[in-house]
Image: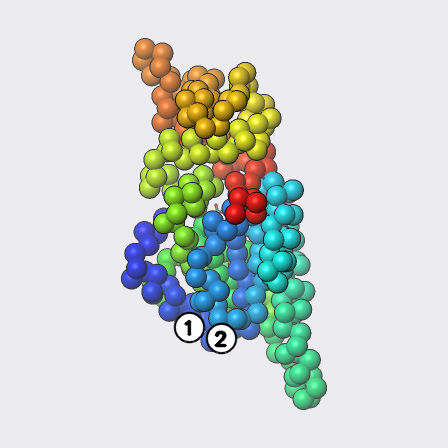
Amino acid sequence: MTIQWFPGHMTKARRQIEDKLKLIDVVIELLDARIPLSSRNPMVDEILKGKPRMVLLNKHDLADPVVTAEWVRYFADQGLQALPIDAASGTQVKEILPRAKALWAHKIESQLRKGINPRAIRALIVGIPNVGKSTLINQLAGKKIAATGDKPGVTKGQQWIKVGTEMDLLDTPGILWPKFEDQMVGLRLAATGAIKEEILHLDEVAFFSIKYMVQHYGTALQERFGIAEMPDDLDDPNQIVSVMEAIGRKRGAIVSGGKVDLDKASLIIIRDLRAGKLGRISLEKPTDY
Ligand code: GDP
């Protein structure tokens, strides 16, 4: 699903999250492990206003584990615990409750001191579209609850989902917008599938992806597509296009006259990358900043 974000949508999305925040104790901020900062809302700190928060790096099954470990350290340096998870298979999802309890421990202890029986922790999942919010809600609920891809502005009655006896989760996530004004961010979002291909030029997204992979994942690229000659100058766009053409030729993306159909080649590259066919690849590192 693609949401065209206009200022009015952002205001509405923000207001909806602020309404939900009144009900909850702990925020679960979902990011894409392959592009943690590019998949993060630029105003998230301001919107969440100091609510106890954990960061989950989702789709870790598709991300480079070495780079993800660097991101975990990056967030730790900012005082945020980041947990790599794979919401689709449920990997590490069981770790969420203990982390939520740790974030809320001070409150539980003070309730106990006052002789009050602590109630279940109330949690809300927030994140940009397609980051896996609905998948995670279903995984935590142990059944299919959330309609994947719900839109901001569509309201329905709030319901709580029981995650065991110790946590209640709001059944509709908070939907945030990405920081797509920055061209590099837009390209990363498109390459991972957070923005659908029709919004950006396919060849630009494929060009960006190939350039990044030549730089960081050359072997995976060569192995997947049997590229004989790899660029030696990343700043020479012709060399990157040559790689795209070699992939097109290899995969039969040819138009009449024997020329490579660059759009078709681009689609092949992006689909393979998103599906993890090139292995586990991250498209952003803390050292990029
Ligand atoms: P939402 O818009 O944030 O609610 O995102 P969805 O839950 O609808 O997920 C978007 C897409 O990402 C779906 O195709 C999911 O199957 C996929 N997805 C979600 N979590 C994971 C994950 O951990 N790994 C992988 N590989 N795919 C995931």
Residue 23 spot, x, y in % from top left: 49, 75
The three-letter amino acid code for the residue at tag 2 is Leu
Marks 1 and 2: in contact by CB < 8 Å? Answer: yes
Residue named by callout 1:
19
Residue 211's spot in the image, x, y percent? 48, 31
- Of residue 245 and residue 21, the one placed in the foreground of this image is 245
Q: Position of residue 281 (x, y in %)?
A: 56, 37
Q: Which residue is mark 2?
A: 23
* In the depicted structure, whether residue 139 falls above or below residue 23: above
Q: Residues within 10 Å of mark 2 (few under 14, many from 20)?
A: few
Q: Which mark is residue 247?
A: none
Work out whether residue 232 or residue 274 is closer to the camera in this orientation and state it: 232
Q: Is residue 271 visible?
A: no
**Vertical position of residue 229 compared to residue 123: above or below:** above
Residue placed at 63% from the left, 58% from the top?
76
Residue 175 drawn at (x, y percent): 42, 59
The residue sitting at 43% across, 46% down in the picture is 185
